[in-house]
Image (spheres, rainbow, N blue to C red):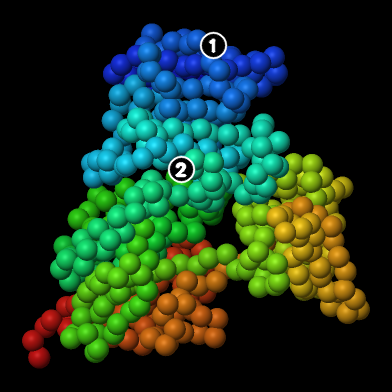
Amino acid sequence: MLDSQIKGQLTAYLERLQRPIELVATLDDSPAANEMRALLVDIVACSPKVSLREDGNASRRPSFAVGLPGEAPRIHFAGLPMGHEFTSLVLALLQTGGHPPKVEPAVIEQIKALPGSFNFETYISLSCHNCPDVVQALNLMAVLNPKVTSTMIDGALFQSEVEARQIMAVPTSYLNGEEFGAGRMLIEEILSKVDTGAAARAAEELGQKEAFDVLVVGGGPAGAAAAIYAARKGIRTGVLAERFGGQVMDTLGIENFISVSHTEGPKLVASLEQHVKDYAVDVMNLQRAGKLVPAAENGGLVGIELENGAKLQAKTVILSTGARWREMNVPGEKEYKAKGVCFCPHCDGPLFKGKRVAVIGGGNSGVEAAIDLAGIVAHVTLLEFADTLRADAVLQNKLYSLPNVTVIKSAQTTEVTGDGQKVNGLRYKDRVSGEEKTVELEGIFVQIGLLPNTDWLKGTLELSRFGEIIIDAKGQTNLPGVFAAGDCTTVPYKQIIIAMGAGATASLSAFDHLIRSSAPA
């Protein structure tokens, strides 16, 4: 099952086990079960501290569990955890075997102190790069708290469950039988939902912080670069982020980051976060800014009011809040989001195997999505508003070579239709003839660009007609002491490498502002 190189790496990892662990398999005669048995046998061969028994009685077959001998296992894998989920398996083995997790001590204590019982089930696809974050977080909770169980379920293998529960996006998690959350969640986010007092405690702690010299709002590439450049100046630096990494966390392949021929979004974000933590930066993750108060109205300091009620102050602020997926804003879209309306073809595509889907948007992202989906689904209909596709010629050539793809240009999507539980089609207007038409399908992937995350700034500082923060060549906004960088600004070309440069520029400008504002007349 595992090649010799992976076996060698796994053997090295399992040398870190501090206590014996046991794999408990619940198998049948299916090909998937045979693959699972081969995987488990290979794992056992990599360490004398790992044993296997095949007398499991789990409700899902094939599946296996990871636990300690003599105890009921709390981590379960209903499916073969390969691809992106292989790391989830390795971490489950190590952490069950006593290897310490790389999380803050306060998080560990919070998990251990959770009251009540928690049975988590997480539906994933093996091609989803966001799913492992949820699986790994819940598995760790199961390791640390005996009242928590975690089950990873491969939606492609257990399609009957996916259809019964109307799951049309991954990861989707259930807690004690009720839907708990959809989409990527960090362990801190999960804890904030199950630990009802966490938000109040966080707000109180944040409100007691002293004023920062530079406060960066946003933890994407621009924010990370700004924080690093500020911290290197030896000044008090903070990063306030709703989700460290931002949009990059949802990016699968990155091949235009100069000097790195290929990487993936989550991998780049992990490197960015580690680089920031190499310096004395106060990272306040999972916090959402709600209001900016100009220095002129706040005693000379720029204020940031958080949605949880906390207030932060700084001599200078760098806004790097990035952007989010642009929505179609048509009837039915919001009602059927995650019920057929999706934004990530890599994550959710496998759930539509053998079905009919549409891709909205004829740029590079839309055409790439259609090409990827064509290898999974029965048929793809790509709809483009303009009379020509905007994607690169090489992508268009590939798209038109696929037999199960239909391209419709001059098409204005007017409505998403459904049966009350899931999508069953869409309506569009032919912009040439004016005729209204209907396409029957099960999934819609929206790929029409990004919107800046600046709604909370309206009426406070100057924005463009597209909602972007207007900046000059130095990243300065129209408010003294307030700078901005990245995809939320008027900087042309929304690219990771450009955002990083813009973050560095804004940080250096903020430092220059500090020097000039503190110098004697």
Up-down relation of residue 481 to residue 197 (above or below): below
Instruction: Where is residue 95? Give x, y as percent.
Output: 35, 28
Question: Which comes sooner in the sequence, label 2 or label 1?
Answer: 1
Describe the element under mark 2 as helix, strand or loop: helix
Within 10 Å of the Cα at label 2, are there few (<14), some (14-19), or many (20+) other Cα atoms? many
Instruction: Where is residue 223? Give x, y as percent.
Output: 36, 64
Q: Quadrant of residue 431?
A: bottom right
Quadrant of the frame with the N terminus: top right
Q: Residue at x 30, y 54 (%)?
A: 198
Q: Residue at x 66, y 37 (%)?
A: 161
Describe the element under mark 1 as helix, strand or loop: loop
Query: Mark 1 = which residue?
Result: 55
Say which mark, if any, is on residue 133.
Answer: 2
Report the residue that reaches farthest toward the front.
116
Instruction: Where is residue 321? Give x, y as percent.
Output: 42, 68
* Tag 2: amino acid: Asp
Q: Quadrant of residue 59?
A: top right
Left or right, 161 with reference to 411: left
